Amino acid sequence: MFIIKSAGFIKSSASVNDCPKAPFPEFAFIGRSNVGKSTLINMLVNRKKLAKTSSAPGKTQLINHFLVNNSWYLTDLPGFGFAKVPLKEKKKWDEMIKQYLLQRKQLMCTFFLIDIRLKPQPIDMNFMQWMGEKRLPFAITFTKADKINKTKVKENINNYENTLSETWESLPPVFVSSGITAEGRNEILEYIYECGKLFDPKVLF
Ligand SMILES: Nc1nc2c(ncn2[C@@H]2O[C@H](COP(=O)(O)OP(=O)(O)OP(=O)(O)O)[C@@H](O)[C@H]2O)c(=O)[nH]1
Ligand SMILES: [Mg+2]
């Protein structure tokens, strides 16, 4: 069992240059609007209201840093592909997210969230493709596993993996999670803990 001793909000940033400077390994949560990024962060750190969530997509609009156990940052990012946001605004968010992913030196791994109920979507495939091309390490995390039964969960993951295998030689790590039942919590925290060990503060200088 992984123990969260402390978890607190640090700041919201409008660009990567604005992000906190302390030398901690960092883990980001990304995915389409409403997929459950903020909910997953709250589930991991066991605080219902740390990251703000909403049933209306587009809730998170900045890069939000949380510090956990005084040891690592978790970052909650705005969702991409939110249809109701004006195109100009959407492009601005996309750019902010991409610059953050490319330039944030202490970023150890990004959790790429996908709603377990959905078939592979071009917008998600394209984003993962982009991360692959940029050599950005990521782990797929399926969300909302409580919404369908176990057989369907397996079926949908298989389907996803088969689609990815058409273009990817090897697949990234895959996690299944639920903000309601806390499924996946230990596995994800364990992974964060292991990746965090690889952090070398020298990359910051
Ligand atoms: N049943 C269930 N509902 C979930 C789960 N995760 C998120 N939700 C719900 O989905 C909605 C969106 O959750 P958020 O965590 O705000 O999603 P987000 O990805 O942060 O959304 P944006 O900040 O708008 O990009 C909320 O109504 C959550 O309660 C889950 O694992 N199970
Ligand atoms: Mg959010």
Image (cartoon, grey):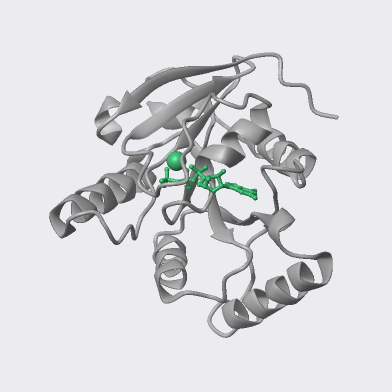
Q: State the image quarter where residue 119 is shown.
A: bottom right
Residue 168 image point, x, y percent: 56, 76
Is there any visible trace of residue 114 in the rendered image?
yes
Quadrant where the N terminus is found in the figure? top right
Q: Is residue 179 left or right of residue 66?
A: right
Residue 200 image point, x, y percent: 55, 30
**Residue in the foreground of this view, choosing between 114 and 86:** 86
Looking at this view, name the residue that lies furthest to the bottom: 166
- In this rendering, the answer to whether 82 lies above or below 100 is below
Q: Residue at x 40, y 70 (%)?
A: 123
- In this rendering, the answer to whether 75 lies above or below 147 is above
Residue 56 image point, x, y percent: 41, 47
**Residue in the foreground of this view, choosing between 5 and 177:** 177
Q: Is residue 175 left or right of residue 131?
A: right
Q: Residue at x 37, y 26 (%)?
A: 205
Looking at this view, name the residue that lies furthest to the right: 1
Is there any visible trace of residue 197 in the rendered image?
no
- In this rendering, the answer to whether 28 lies above or below 5 is below
Q: Residue at x 54, y 47 (%)?
A: 36
Residue 13 image point, x, y percent: 30, 28
